[in-house]
Amino acid sequence: MQTALGPVKRGKWKRRILWLIALGAVALLVWCLSIYAMVVRFDGSPKDGKPIASDVGIVLGARLWNDQPSPGLRERLDLALDLYRQGAFANVIVTGGLDAYGATITEAEGMRNYLVANGVPESAILLDTESRSTYENLLFAQDIMDANDWTSAVIVTHNYHGSRAADIAKKVGLSPVQVSVTDSYVLNVPYHQAREVLAYTKWLGMKLFL
């Protein structure tokens, strides 16, 4: 009798394990699709794309190429230039430390050089040269704001990055949260959107311990 039931019991356990695996896969898929929807639907804050005039613009860093802003980073900087010229802010914080791809200057220094070459006075640009992540970009930028008695900011980045940047900004205490975003014509956007799902998931886990 016991010998006959053994395979049946093992079969039941296998089916249960398979069901658990299937449920886990479905839950993971739903999670990823939910985050992906947040990433691709974000189109700036406020929704009309017109930020309230603020003390400072915060340009989130990205890679340099031969100590010059990469094409993707130039898109962010060009948006910051447009906003600066429109009077959205009178000062700019550029963020980003030394990356691991052969640069001899920090991302922030490369960004400053680009803005100065395009007409922004160097005196209007402050640098965070230590940050290594979006969270640090905004945390260290907030420290710079506090040191200068600035209370309002416009964050500048790409569309695919905007939702997470807004959530991080809220966490570090920026209020109101304003994020101006640009489309990209030089980046592999589907790749960056998919990568952002992982980065957003990592951030949400990290946020639980902050």
Image (spheres, rainbow, N blue to C red):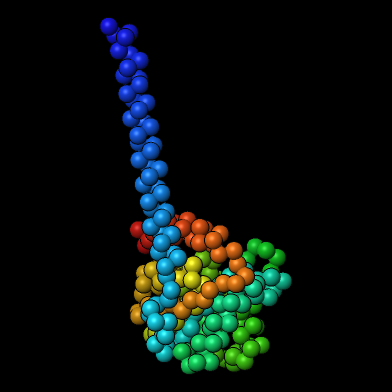
Please identify the quarter of the rendering in which residue 51 is found: bottom left
Could you say which is closer to the camera, residue 60 or residue 8?
A: 8
Please identify the quarter of the rendering in which residue 178 is found: bottom left
Q: What residue is at 37 percent from the left and 51 percent from the top?
A: 30
Q: What residue is at 67 percent from the left and 63 percent from the top?
A: 101
Q: Where's residue 48, x and y in %?
A: 39, 82
Q: What residue is at 50 percent from the left and 87 percent from the top?
A: 83
Q: Where's residue 77, x and y in %?
A: 58, 80
Could you say which is closer to the camera, residue 98 or residue 111?
A: 111
Q: How many marks?
A: 0
Q: Where's residue 26, x and y in %?
A: 38, 45
Q: What residue is at 56 percent from the left and 59 percent from the top?
A: 191
Please identify the quarter of the rendering in which residue 46 is found: bottom left
Which quadrant of the rendered structure holds the C terminus?
Answer: bottom left
Using residue 75 as the reference point, say whether residue 67 is left or right of it: right
Q: Residue furthest top?
A: 1
Q: In this view, does 5 lie above or below 76?
A: above
Could you say which is closer to the camera, residue 50 or residue 106?
A: 50
In this view of the protein, can residue 105 be seen by the observer? Answer: no
In this view of the protein, can residue 118 be seen by the observer? Answer: yes
Which quadrant of the rendered structure holds the N terminus?
Answer: top left
Q: In this view, does 198 lie above or below 71?
A: above
